[in-house]
Image (cartoon, helix red, strand yellow):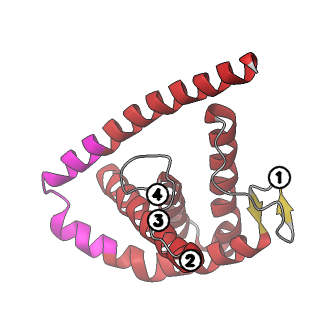
Amino acid sequence: MLRQTGQCFLIYSFLGWILEGLFNRVKAGTFRKPNFLHGPVKPMYGFGGVLLAGSYKYDRRHFACNCWLLPLLVEYISALWLERRYALKYWDYSKEFMQMDGRICLKFALCWVILAQVVVRCIQPLLDAMLRATGKLSGWKTLFQLFFLDCAVTMHQRKKQCAIRHSIKILS
């Protein structure tokens, strides 16, 4: 069960990277968008997808509420962590209608509700079937190792960049 959850996390993280790339392609004309990690993953989507799939599996009665709550919590906490830990701000909803601290807003909350339905009703059943067939492949171990290596390298680099920016502010 834990292995499959981890695999879903990586898949949702990759699908989130694709989704944001496509969104950026439509909005800005380029698929490439700044990313915290170097690899083609957005862990925020991994956490959101896993939490939503688990919520649907174990508590369908409250799933409609969780479609609102879980993605917004993940997005808010991710933004807060990036800002406080690394002084990074990848999105700013401060000009959007019904927003909170520029980190979450109603427009994207509605998008997350729709996406949550797609995840649990369409994508998760396909993932379950695929992982039953391929879940024991050794390639998963390599993917996890690459993901954790990317996390470690990126966090180290970002921390150094943050310290340099802080030093420059002090000198200014």
Q: Secondary structure at mark 4?
A: helix
Q: Nearer the viewer, mark 3 or mark 4?
A: 3
Q: Count residues near mark 4 (Cα–Cα under 10 Å), then give few for <14, some for 14-19, many for 20+.
A: many
- Rendered image quadrant of residue 161: top right
Name the spot of residue 171 as percent of width and height, x first.
72, 16
Q: Count residues near mark 1 (Cα–Cα under 10 Å), then give few for <14, some for 14-19, many for 20+.
A: few
Q: Which mark is residue 101?
A: 1
The residue nearer to you, when weighing 24 against 1, is 24
Location of the C terminus by quadrant is top right
The first of marks 3 and 2 along the sequence is 3
Residue at x 24%, y 72% (from the top left corner):
130
Q: Secondary structure at mark 1?
A: loop
Name the spot of residue 42 as percent of width and height, x first.
47, 56
Majority SS type along the magenta span: helix
Question: In the rendered view, would you say 79 is above or below 129?
Answer: above
Residue at x 86%, y 72% (from the top left corner):
97
Residue at x 58%, y 67% (from the top left corner):
59
* Tag 2 residue: 115
The first of marks 1 and 3 along the sequence is 3
Q: Nearer the viewer, mark 3 or mark 2?
A: 3
* Tag 4 residue: 46
Q: Amino acid at mark 3?
A: Gly
